[in-house]
Amino acid sequence: MTGLFISFEGVDGVGKTTQVERLRAYLEAQGRTVVVTREPGGTALGRAIRQMLLHGVDGGAADIAPRTEALLFAADRAQHVAETIRPALERGEVVITDRYLDSSLAYQAGGRELTLREIKDLSLWATNNLLPARTYLLDMDPALSHSRLQHAEDRMESAGDDFQSRTRQAFLDLAAAEPTRFRVIDASQRIEQVWAAIEADVETLLKELA
Ligand code: TYD
């Protein structure tokens, strides 16, 4: 595969979408073809799964069992990789995804009752072992990032401060365990400063790959 695969991670409201768009513009200006996508919901099937996960079924907030939840996120990811990510990488394009398997590791294993090993095995099976070349973890206190959210809370977002704090720590632990793939960026800085940190790193990454 000749393309470049980059993911953005972090708790809700840290500004991933803004930075993803900055990175898209930067890479397109260099003549790259860029596919911007997201999880859950990067495909048509994924959007149906996303709806179930975030808003429940039959208009009610479904009580989704932890294993079911993990499988639904993994199913979304499997389809996303097969339908969108791998084909784009095979065409030599850049794929930037707003969330990927580290979100499952942080939210489903870090926050709820399943082990990291179980969720990791499930995700690697779902993706046939596809990992990003670089993962930007936008890190900030969930109490702050939450207050930035500009829409009504979904099922995951309303899981409580404790859950969000554990999730943040889980992301930081994942980053510490894989320092080559991850870059932790302080997302409490101004948008321009956050972008400057990402831009500097991407420049180095592109040079390394060239
Ligand atoms: P996201 O699309 O980032 O939310 P929004 O559109 O509100 O910005 O993600 C939806 C929620 O799903 C978010 O709270 C994180 C959660 N999530 C998991 O719990 N596990 C996963 O594997 C993924 C991809 C997301």
Image (tube, rainbow, N blue to C red):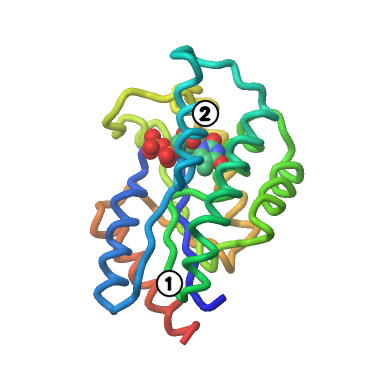
Q: Is mark 2 within 8 Å of ligand 1?
A: yes
| Residue 127 sits above or below residue 107 on the image | below
Looking at the rendered structure, which numbered label has been put on residue 207? none
Q: Secondary structure at mark 2?
A: helix
| Residue 208 sits above or below residue 46 on the image | below
Q: Give the CA distance from mark 1 to mark 2.
A: 30 Å
- Residue underneath mark 2: 53
Q: Is mark 1 within 8 Å of ligand 1?
A: no
**Quarter of the figure with residue 86:** bottom right
Viewed as shown, does residue 136 lie left or right of 76?
left
Q: Secondary structure at mark 1?
A: loop
Whole-percent x and y of residue 17? 33, 49
| Residue 160 sits above or below residue 166 on the image | above
**Identity of the residue drawn at 64% across and 35% down:** 70
Viewed as shown, does residue 49 lie left or right of 94?
right
Q: Dot 1, how many residues are within 10 Å of its Cα: few (below 14), some (14-19), or many (20+)?
A: many
**Quarter of the figure with residue 151:** top left
| Front residue of 115 and 139 | 115
Whole-percent x and y of residue 125? 72, 52
Which amino acid type is marked by label 1? Glu
**Identity of the residue drawn at 49% across and 62% down:** 183
**Identity of the residue drawn at 58% across and 68% down:** 180
Which amino acid type is marked by label 2? Leu
Extreme residue in the bottom direction: 210
Whole-percent x and y of residue 36? 37, 57
Looking at marks 1 and 2 on the same chain, the residue that comes earlier in the sequence is marked by 2
| Front residue of 77 and 131 | 77
Q: Is residue 204 visible?
A: yes
Viewed as shown, does residue 136 lie left or right of 33?
right
**Quarter of the figure with residue 175:** bottom right
- Residue underneath mark 1: 93
